[in-house]
Image (cartoon, rainbow, N blue to C red):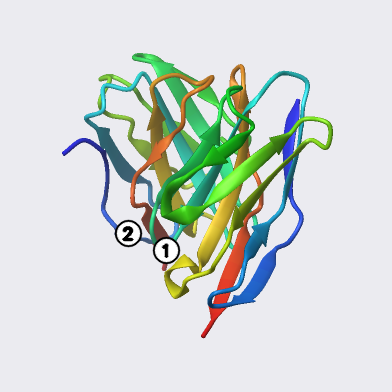
Amino acid sequence: AQSVTQLDSHVSVSEGTPVLLRCNYSSSYSPSLFWYVQHPNKGLQLLLKYTSAATLVKGINGFEAEFKKSETSFHLTKPSAHMSDAAEYFCVVSALNDMRFGAGTRLTVKP
Amino acid sequence: DGGITQSPKYLFRKEGQNVTLSCEQNLNHDAMYWYRQDPGQGLRLIYYSQIVNDFQKGDIAEGYSVSREKKESFPLTVTSAQKNPTAFYLCASSADRVRTEAFFGQGTRLTVV
């Protein structure tokens, strides 16, 4: 069985400050991990993915995430938030025939 | 342009009616999925299909049905047995169901009137 916990349902930052969205996972296997972003009333867009290569993964729009097996975490970061980053973010764990989504973190960016 | 097309974008259903949501992909992906999204609950899997003419129930399949007669198409029917169908429905596909990422359509918002 697998599960994902996104530790914050809502994160608010000021434009130009760092972003940290936290994700912990549980899996009996060696999973793949993904971060997706969703803007209002839109589908999900892949930000980045980890599939057992480098533990520090770089994605689109300046986002990156670090896979830490010992902490079972896959936190998403960005050095400097932009207004266009305001959206819902989903962490996903996938292994064998099972893909699980976290409940999502809503990121608000204040001017 | 490769991608996933969902239609319609908005759909209104009367109580007791069945409605069908369309999902088409031209990515040549084997696996396709339907998810339901409600506020604050993330995405929940309704059905998935890994190959033509085969599909499996997800976590919340009751009140829904699907078919996979063609590789490109995976329509979802919301039946009258689904007691609370108002939600945002997302279709996705992936090359396989193990290591590759899923690509999503733009969603269909279903409202019961």
Q: Secondary structure at mark 1?
A: strand
Instruction: Identify the element where label 2 is drawn.
Output: strand
Image coordinates of residue B60 in percent, x first then y, are 60, 39
Residue A48 percent coordinates (x, y): 50, 41
Q: Is residue A92 left or right of residue B4?
A: right
**Residue at screen point 32% across, 59% down:** B11
Residue A39: x and y, percent?
Answer: 43, 62
- Give yes or no for contact between labels 2 and 1 (Cβ–Cβ under 8 Å): yes
Residue furthest to the bottom: A111
Who's the residue at 52% across and 21% down the image? Answer: B99
Write down the chain letter for disc 2. B
Amino acid under label 2?
Answer: Leu
Residue in view at x 42 percent, y 63 percent: B111
The span from disc 2 to disc 1 (Cα, nearest Å) is: 6 Å
Q: Which mark is residue B57?
A: none
Q: In the rendered structure, which amino acid carries the disc numbered 1?
A: Thr
* Residue that badge 2 annotates: B11
Residue B82 visible in the snapshot? no
Residue assigned mark 1: B111
Which residue is more in the foreground, B111 or A62? A62
Q: Is residue A42 visible?
A: yes
Q: Which quadrant would residue A4 be assigned to in this image?
A: top right
- Where's the C terminus of chain B, which quadrant? bottom left
Lower sequence index among marks 2 and 1: 2
Quarter of image, res B28: top left
Instruction: Tell which subunit mark 1 falls on.
Output: B
Q: Residues within 10 Å of mark 2 (few under 14, many from 20)?
A: some
Q: Residue furthest right?
A: A70
> On the picture, is A31 further left or further right than A37?
right
